[in-house]
Structures are given as structure tokens and as C-alpha cells.
Amino acid sequence: MQKLLQLPVNAVNIVKGVQGVTQGQEEALSPVLTPDSGPQNWYSAVQPEELRHLRSGGTEDRSALEEGLNSVQTQPLRHDDLKEMLDSNKDSLKLEAMKRIVAMIARGKNASDLFPAVVKNVACKNIEVKKLVYVYLVRYAEEQQDLALLSISTFQRGLKDPNQLIRASALRVLSSIRVTIIVPIMMLAIKEAASDMSPYVRKTAAHAIPKLHSLDPEQKDQLIEVIEKLLADKTTLVAGSVVMAFEEVCPDRIDLIHKNYRKLCNLLIDVEEWGQVVIINMLTRYARTQFLNPNINESLLEENSEKAFYASDDEEEEDKKAEPATLAKRKPYVMDPDHRLLLRNTKPLLQSRNAAVVMAVAQLYFHLAPKAEVGIIAKALVRLMRSHSEVQYVVLQNVATMSIKRRGMFEPYLKSFYIRSTDPTQIKVLKLEVLTNLANETNISTILREFQTYIKSMDKDFVAASIQAIGRCATNIGEVRDTCLNGLVQLLSNRDELVVAESVVVIKKLLQMQPEQHSDIIKHMAKLIDNIQVPMARASILWLIGEYCEHVPKIAPDVLRKMAKSFTNEEDIVKLQIINLAAKLYLTNSKQSKLLTQYVLNLAKYDQNYDIRDRARFIRQLIVPTDKSGALSKYAKKLFLALKPAPVLESPFKDRDHFQLGSLSHLLNAKAAGYQELPNWPESAPDPSVRNVEIPDWSKCSSRKDRKEKKVEKPFYSDSEGESGPTESADSESDSGSGSASASGSDESGSGSESEESGEETESDEEEEDEEEEKKKRKKLDKTKAKKQCIINFDQFDMNKITSVFSQTLAPSGSIKMYELLHRIKGEGLAVEYCFSRQPFSPEPNMVAVQIQFTNNTNSETKNLHIEDPRLQSGMRIREFAEIDVLAAGESVTVVMGIDFCDSTQAANFQLCTHTRKFFVSIQPPVGELMTPAFLTENDFKKEQGKLMGMNEILEKLTLGEKCVNEHVIVERVTATANLSRVPCGSDKECRFAGKTVSSGCLVLVTVTTKEGGGAQLTVNCEKMLIGTMLVKDILQALSQ
Amino acid sequence: MIHSLFLINNAGDLFLEKHWKSVISRSVCDYFFEAREKAVEPDNVPPVIRTPHHYLINIYREKIFFVSVIQTEVPPLFVIEFLHRVAETFQDYFGECSESTIKDNVVIVYELLEEMLDNGFPLATESNILKELIRPPTILRSMVNTITGSSNVGETLPTGQLSTIPWRRAGVKYTNNEAYFDVVEEIDAILDKSGTTVFAEIQGVIDACVKLSGMPDLTLSFMNPRLLDDVSFHPCVRYKRWESERVISFVPPDGNFQLMSYHISAQNLVAIPVYVKQNISFFETGSSGRLDITVGPKQTMGKTVEGLVVTVHMPKVVLSANLNATQGTYNYDPVTKILVWDIGKLNPQKLPNLKGSLSLQSGAPKPEENPSLNIDLKIQQLAISGLKVNRLDMYGEKYKPFKGVKYVTKAGKFQFIRSAIFLSDKSYRIATLCTISLIF
């Protein structure tokens, strides 16, 4: 339409140019140009200015056709006005005109006749005018190729501008102009920009590559050269864009990736989100061609145990059992370090806020990771399900596919797939699909209960899908088949016909599996035929009766009689089944049904539908013996009453995973244009050395020049860069090693505050969780001391060493209670104090660490301080401190010893010897010191508490002391009394603590519940009742003070 | 990748089109209209529609369909996520993303779309960069612009695009340096008729408003990071440090942004702040029914429950409701069959109650199902999960940030698309809102 109308407009312009404006207006009135003159009169009565308002206000909603007509009538007027504005000297007028033109483009109206007037302004000084001109130019250049060329020189000039942003934007617009004649210019510009100093310009060059490729595919070879060059680029800015170009121009040139593979993996985390998606998808394909299948052993098994597919628990076990056997046969699988690098560097991106990135990582793990590691993606995918419904839709599709292959991974999140009544139907159906896939023997009862509630939903499509889902569960899990069948039969008496009909269809499929046992159900269904109107259901019932007419010999002929009566009014599918029923009855029970069959076949012979006429003719020939009937009629019984295999109800998502997950093709279950097949794993691994990068080259560009550049650009993110660096392969290891060292080194020397940060940063890297916890405790204990220690890189230290360093330097702080072991007078000037440092005693974890401080108050030195002759209860042990050779006068020294108290408060007696004397001393621990903190979640706490009820639970009421005003004080008091850790708790009325006894590791759980008016209740749960009782006493005392 | 974009309103009018490659006729949208008609509800339009030559990927937001045209293979989530980003950018620029604002600001919209995609591949989607390129409209500026003829397009060249920290522009300067963090949590729960929790989980987000000069490097730590079961971050957050130390270390974008969102799993016990006693019954004869709902506080941790709204989805046969509310107002919409009871603040001394009769369509059978209840509420100054921010440290800048405590209370901003109604008899959707302000 628009094309057609364009001509007259141009014509008007030409005429107008000659005749002037007023005549042009008359021309516009000409009936030739305006077939419908009614509205046109109305328009011409209005001033152009007002007209504009009118148009922008009210007329937009008219149909496109009408708009097209209107624009023809009014364009000459309005466009003149716009042209004048564009020609004026004032930027504000030009801007106003351009804005109006852009608004026209946005509404999809044709503004192409303004091209000459607009293109003049391509060199305008005003940035906004310029930008809008670019918008216009890119939109219409294709239609006005010759005129578009006028603007090219401006962009060529722009390409040489000293400002990188102007260079980039010139290239961007130039490459967007789809005019074939400028292809050589574009090619030249892209090549130049690809080696530009500025990474931003290089990025723009990468963007321009697919544009040029789509304009002129013959340039492919040259463009691949540029891509190769840009792939070698080491900035994060370029990486995403160039991989995008690679995917569009030459996705099969996998060889270009080899050299850049490790770099891409390492840069990945810093690339912008959209680039990440493209790179991850590309690397998935790459990895499939270059590495071996990590599940190669499992996949063999999987094929063997196809039958046991729905019994995953068994399968897992089988796996384990069979594994050694297969391993013995096959060469053990060793993962390529580069494969591992990819998996490791993509994992953190599961935490991205961008759903597309998360999905990309998820599919990468699904396609590439060893079976045991795939599970980590489940949580992230479940998270995506809380996003917009469109995201949910796509994610659920992918989860549905994944859940068939790897059901175990989503089982813990079963409840997240429960359906909410506000979900759109398409989401509901997908969730049902996932729930059905996840069903197994253990969870089937919960799932079925959930399905039952779904059947009550108001959404009928969804109800139907639910019933089908029940059917699928029933076929897949033999144990519940009868339950499901009974449930479905109950549904047959439902008031809603749709529910009944759907149940019938599903029951039919289920019955086919074991018809013998269920003739009563068939009878029941036969009765239904009088009431059910839904054709599909009627047809299903008839088929069932026909198929199993031997099980219901009395009812079947009667049903046929009824059906024969109503034959003419039935739907086509029902009619076909009536014919089938008649034929089958004729074969089994011809005495009763011969006439009926004849009658039905006669009716069918004159039916309007040719399918039915055909079927009738076909069946008559087969079953009714005549002279002419051929050899086939002998086999009629075999033909009709052959045992039919039960239908396999399987997921529509089965085997969809041959498409790369997350792709459009996967979603549509059909290959989309431009889809790159996900290759199968190679039989043997291709040479991994192709990814090696020559070391001198690498170190030259990356560790010096590039690293310097990076430091300037991103002073704070280099740490992640350094950390993500390490590869197992030799060459890049050297790089990463030097990289992280240099990065952290420069950070530290950079400024004071930074060094502190990097100190803390390295502190607990890669250490086990509990160790980290310990350290945090320790840090709290004596922060200043800890700070000093932080400068040491703990990674390289053995934990034991650290502990000893700590315990020796650690002065007992105020919060820890000191006990006297030997009074200064009694000890003749030697004072000994001890405290329970609450540190784990590193040489023996089940000993309590006791920190002993010797102070020599005499004037002479004391020598050979050591322990002798410990007298202990049975089972108790002591680990003595190393002998102190000399303790100078006035000095004091602290040592640590370990005592295993066997979880009792019995005292440990021993002799403390100096070079001159022996002192009998004893250490008796308070019960609270016999435990170490245990870190539980609230849930674990509840669970454990549940196990320790009855005799193991001690309840005590108490009145809180005056100072126990708030939670904080309570926590302080309790933790001072006993070495416990706080457990998170949802309520502020409750404080929970948990610990383990040091020696035997029994859990100690303490709950303090405060009540109104200073009252409180103390609960202690502990398997060791004695400890529990004593602890209650101690805490009571502490809290009521 | 993304070929064209069409914006279509709920009535089916196509009011904006933008092409990044060659022009695609708007007639391609006919396939969309067809699907739209079939779907009845706008929610049910399939996000991906296949046409003979193109694929249409669409999202529905703020009563507008964003329909994008795709020609070749592309991850659908990539497009969907981008379209949502476009809608969010509009919201950010114009305060709301509606047909009228888009039409009013069509030129800015066009400029934005031009910058966000290049040849169908996202170019600049960070709002910080976009705001440098194209200034958002304000009343003052648009007045000045009309008088002086100056423009919305930034005169300065965007620097953010050039750096590897694209979310932050260079040279930020404030006289008052401040940073606020809002911890907003939502409980999703399914409760059965007896009030036991079938399913409960907490969704939380931390929204930040950071106005700090220069390039500050912040570290936020929690008292109890172990609570967080699953987290996702703004790209500015360093994943590695979270993995190793459970602290959030980041160079913040300038202004408002969502730092992270998290999830606290159903395994942890979730406190349910209110209970509901409900009795909705329909009589076998006489086509009427009775309704009695009482709401009371349960585990509120001493805080007041506000903004309490109870929504009941009635069965189709319910024609009208004649009820009496002791507190608040109720409204029954006979078209959508939704009963909304707006209670407001929950007074523990005097529990709000809604009682009365329902009249049913005569002759219709008694509805089988019990209608489900939906509850909205808000609790200020409380993060229901018990999550606590421990401290915030700043590195990399020498200045002393402005010290002060500021409590910000935001309400209703976090209208999640997904509302939680469940098939069980009773359900809650609870949003607790809590603001923790930090002193440096």
C-alpha cells in the first residue's frame, strides 16, 4: 500500500517544486490523487499547525490503511513545513523538525521523501540533530541509495577523528547504511578500526562485521581474517562482540578458537552480560568437539539400564557397583585441564542477575559436566522460576528436558514446581510436565495428592492436563497404577463433563496394560456412554468395549444396539469407533450382533464423510463372507483382535536434548535458521596442544603490557582476574602465578587501605568452612593480634602452625576467665594461672586446650618447668606442653596443653615441676568448657532437638537477672558460661546455642526463651545427661545474676 | 539477533516500531494477533511464536506487548531478558512504562532503542551509560529545552562505555557522600486449612542507593550470611569473594540499583506473621452462602502489621456479597469474582473480622471448591528471615563519607509480577519491608 502511494507523493513534490506552494496545495486537492475526498476537505480546512496537533493526538489509532491515505493527503503540506525548518539556520527548528520526523518513523509512517532535506544536516553541529539524522539515514538509506552516498564522506572524515567515541560512532553508522556500493569503503574502515588503539573502536568494528557480511556475503574470507585478529584481542570489551561476529559469520571455523580458548575462559567473568551468553554458548559447542565425554562410563551403563530408568535409586547403586568393572575394562577417564577450566570459570556466573547468563551456564553444565557436578545448576534454575512469566516459560521448558535425563537433580526442589492458581495456563502445564517427570516411588504419593487439588481448578485446560499427568504417573510407576486407576474411576462421577471425558481417555490407556483385572471398570464405563457427550470420550469407551468385548460379553451387544440407534447423530470419530465395535462384535459374537452390524454398515455406507464410507466398505469386505471375498477375510479375526501393544505415555520432552538447551530450536523442537548442531563427543580427544599459546608471546603481551593496561583500567577487579587465572596446564600456570602475585603486590604497595583489604582477602581463601569459622572466632577474641597475623598469607601455611603461632602469642584477653593453678606464695614466687582458651587443640582435636601462664615473681630464674606424674581418672589423657627451659626473673610465659577430660568435670591432677621443687596441682574444668561450638542452621537445630527429647531434655524455669534486659546480654552470658555458638533463629524471644562435647562429639543444644516480665525458660538437650544437668545449673546461675 | 521491535497495547494497536536491520513489514504482527486472540488472557500468549519466516518473541509488561522479530537462532532468554531490560529502562527514564509515556517521549524512546542495540546485539544496557548519552526528561529540563532549544542528548561523551566497569561513570562528585541499603523480604507460603505450613520460603532483595564520589570500593558483610541459600548479584559484585568469604565486595554503580537478590530456603523455618480463621460455606439449597474471616497476629516479633489486604477468588457462581467488616473496607467485583478486603493496620487487641452472606446464581450447583485466600501485608523495620547487615567498609577513596542515619520506608515498590496464590485453601503473600541504614 505504502509503496503504491509513494509515487503520487513524489509526483506532487516534483510538481510543487515547479509551481510553488499554493498550487501544490491545490494539487493535493485533486481528485485523482485523493480517491476519497470527504475527510480531505475537512483536513484542508484546518491550518497545518493545528493539523499536526490533531494528528498527533487523535488519529493514531485509526487503521493503517486510513493512515496511509491521510498521510498522502497531508504530507505535501506538512513536509514542506518540515523542509523549511530543516533548511533554516536555527538548530532549535532543525531539532524540532527532526523530532517530528523521528516520531513519524516510530509510528511506521513513510518519511522517505524528506531524504534530501534531512541528509543535508548530517554534518550539523548539534549533537542531537546529528543523532536523529543518523537514525533517519539508517532507516531510509536502503531506499534512497544514491542520495545516501552524499553522507558517506562525512563518516569517512569521522573515522579519522582523534576522539575514539566519534570514530566509533562514525563506523557504527557507516556500517549500518545498507548500500552495496560502499562495501569496499566499509571493508577498509572495519580493517582499520580492528587495529585501532581504542578497545571501544575495536568493539564497534566487531559489531560491524556481521552487518557487512549480511550486506555482501562474498566478503566472508576477508571478514574472517578480521575476526581472527579480533579474537586475539585481550580486552573484555571486545571479546563478547567478536564472538558474536564469529557466530554469525563463520561458526564452523572452530580452529580459530583454539589459541584463544584459555583467554576467553579467563576473561569470561568480566565480559558484559550479553557477551557472556554468546561466549558460553560458543564454548559449549567448542568443548563438545575438543574434549572427551566425562560421563563416558556412565553413559554406557545408562544404555544398558534403560529399563531401570524410572528407578533412579537402584540405578545409582548399580552405577556404583558396576563402575569398577567398567573402569577396569576402559581406560580411566581423565578430564582435560582445559575442560575443567571452562567448568570452573563459568560456575560463578550461575549467580548472575541475568537469566540468559544463568541459562547459558546451566546448559553448559548439562552438556559438558560430569554427572556428579551437574546438580549445582538446579538451584540457579529454580531461582529463575521466580522471575517474569516469560522467563519461567523458557526455563521450565529446559527443566522439563533436563528432568528426564537427570531427575535426581531437581528432586529436592519438587515443591518449587507446585502450581499456583495464578500461574498462566502455559506455565501450569509445563510445571505439570516437570512434576510428572520427577515422580518416583518415594514422592509419588505427595505428587498425586497435589494433582488431586489441581483437578478442582477452574482452568479446564489445566484440569485436563492434570488428569493426563496422573495417567502418565500411573504407567510409569507400577506401584501406584491401581491407586491412580481408582482415583480416575472416581472422577468418572465428576459433575464436570470435561473431567470425565479426559479421565475416560486416560483410563482407556491404562486399561490397555492389564485389561483382565478390570472388567468391572469397563462395565462402569459402558454405562457412562449414555451421558457423556464429549466425542473423544465416547470414542474411547466404544473402542474399549470393542477391544475387550470378551470381558463384557453381555453388555457389548447392548451398547452396539444403542449406538446403532444414534449413529447418524454422532461425531465422525465416534462413528468410526462404532463401526470398529460392530466389526469386532461380529467376529466374536455374530449370533447376537449380525443384524446390528449390517445395519450400522449400511448407515455408514451413505454417510457424508468419505472416511466413514471407506471404512464401512473396507470392513464389510473383510468380515462379511461373500463369494468374492478374498483370502483376507480368513484372517479378519487376527486383524481386528490382534493383541495391541499398550501405549507408551511418554514426555513430549523426551530426547529433546539433542538440541542445545536454552536455544530457540530446543524451545520449538525444530531446527531454527542458523542453528548450529551440538556435535557429539569425539571418540578420542583431539590434540590438546593446539590450545597452547607460545609462552614468550603470551608473557610478553599479557603479563606486561596487557596487565599494566588492566591495572589502569580496573584497579579493583584485578584480583578476580588473577584468581580466575590458574589453569592446570603448564604454560598458563606460569602466567597466572605471576599474574596474581603481581596484582596483589601492586595492590599492597598502592595504598594503605588497600593492603589491608588484600590481606583480609587472601586470609581465608580455599580453606575449609570450619577452619574459617574458627578463625573468625579467634579474630573476635583478639582483633588487634589477628590483624598482625593477617599479613601472612595463610594459604601457604599449615593450619597447625598457625594455631601454634596464635596460641603462643595470644595473651589471655579480658573476656576469658583466669583460674589460679598455683598461688604465688604457695609456689614460692612462681605464680601459675590457667584459662580455657576455647581454641581447638590442634594436635588432638578431642582435647580441651588449656592455656597456662607462668609468672616468675622471684629474683632468680626458674628452670626446667614441666609436668610430671599425672594422676588421672581412667580414660583421661594429657598432652603436656614442651618443657620451658628458663623463665627469667620477673618474666612470664604462656604455654598450651591439651587435656582430654572424657566429657566429665573430674579434675586432672598432676605435678608441676621446676628444677628445684614439685607442686601438686589440679585443673578442674567448668562444664561449659568441655564443649566446642557447633554451627547448625536453624533447621538442623530443630531436627537435632527433635532427636534429643525425653530424658535428654532438661527444662528449667528461671527469672532473669536485672541486667539481662535484652537478647544481647543473654547471648553474652550464655556464651561466657559455655563454649557454644549462636544458632540463627527467626524469633527474637528465643536464643539458641549449639555445641559439641570436645571428647565424644555429642551435641549440646541450649534454648533460652524469654517471657514477659523477666521470666524465661531454659532448655538443654544433650545425650549426656550429667553434662546437661550441670550446664543447666551453670547457665541458670549466669542468667539470674 | 533482534531484528525489529513492535510495541502493541492491550487493545491491539501497534504504536511504535523500530528496526535495527532492514525493515520488516508490520504485517508480521498478524501472527501475533492471532496468537493473542487464541490465548484469551494476555498472560497466556506464548512467549515464542513461530511464523513462516520469522520468530516472534514477546513479553507482556505494564499492559504493553513488546514483540521482537527474530530471524535466526538465538537463545530465547537472551531476547526476553533484553526486552525486560528495555521496559525497565523506560520505567527508569519516565517513571512508568506505559503507552502514554512512551508516546509522549517517543523521540527519547527512539534514541534509547538506538543506543541499546546495534545491529540487533545489545550495546549499552547499563542505565548509567545510557543516562550519560541521553538525559532523562524532567519537567524543568523540558521547559528549558523548549525555550533555549537545547537538547536531551548529553554533550559529553560517555566514558562508562570505555571502561571495564561499565556500570559506573567516571568523575562522580557529591557533597554529601552517603549510601543506603534497603533489605526487602517477601514470604511466599502455602498454608492448608488447618494453618500448617505446606510450603514457605523467603525472597529478599537488597536495594541500594549509593551516592559516593569517585571510585569507592565497598565491602558489605552480614552477621549471618549462612542464612542465604541462593543469591544472585548485580554484575558489579565480585563472585570470588562471595564464594570464599561470604562478603559482598563491589564498586557500586552510581545511584539506585539492586545489589543482590536472595532466597532463604524452605528448610529454614519461616515465621508466619499472621493467622487467618476462615469459614466460607455454600448452602445446598437456596443459592446462598456464608463467609466469615478473621485475621490475627501470629509471629510478628513485636512489630506492627500494616497494609493488610485479604483477597478471595470466589467461584464463578457467586453473584454478590453482602458483608460487614469490623475494620477496613471490602469490595467485591462480580466480573472478576474477586473479593478484596482492605484492612490496613492490624490491631492485636481488636481483631478485624469480615462476616456476611454471599448470594449465588440461582439454579447453579453448589461450588465444589473452597476459594483460596490471598494475603498482602507489610511489616516495617523487620527482615523476617533475621538477616542482619554487619558492616560496610569503604576502600579506595580518601574522603570521609557523610555520617548519619536515615531511615527510608518504601512501600509497594516491589510489586512482583508473580503473585502467590495457591490451590490450597489458604495462602499468604507477605512482604516485609525493612530498611537498615548504615553509619560509616
Image: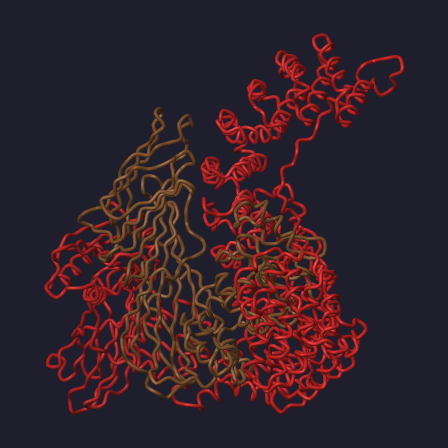
Chain colours: A red, B brown
Question: Which of the two residues, A453 or A731, is positioned nearer the viewer here?
Answer: A453
Question: Which of the two residues, A830 or B213, is positioned nearer the viewer here?
Answer: B213
| Residue A413 horizontal/vertical position (percent) | 47, 51
**Residue A275 seen anywhere in this rendered image of the structure:** no
| Residue B76 horizontal/vertical position (percent) | 61, 59
Q: Where, quadrant-wise, is the C terminus of chain B in this rendering?
A: bottom left
Q: Is residue A575 left or right of residue B341?
A: right
Query: At 38% from the left edge and 56% from the top edge, which residue is drawn?
Result: B202
Query: At 67% from the left edge and 84% from the top edge, which residue is drawn?
Result: A695
| Residue A37 horizontal/vertical position (percent) | 66, 58
Question: Which of the two residues, A386 or B278, is positioned nearer the viewer here?
Answer: B278
Q: Where, quadrant-wise, is the N terminus of chain B in this rendering?
A: bottom right
Quarter where residue B437 is shown: bottom left
Query: At 26% from the left edge and 63% from the top edge, which residue is drawn?
Result: A930
Q: Is residue A223 left or right of residue A778?
A: right
User: What residue occupies the far top of the structure in this picture?
Assistant: A591
**Residue B375 seen anywhere in this rendered image of the structure:** yes
Q: Is residue B256 above or below residue A487?
A: below
Quarter where residue A601 is shown: top right
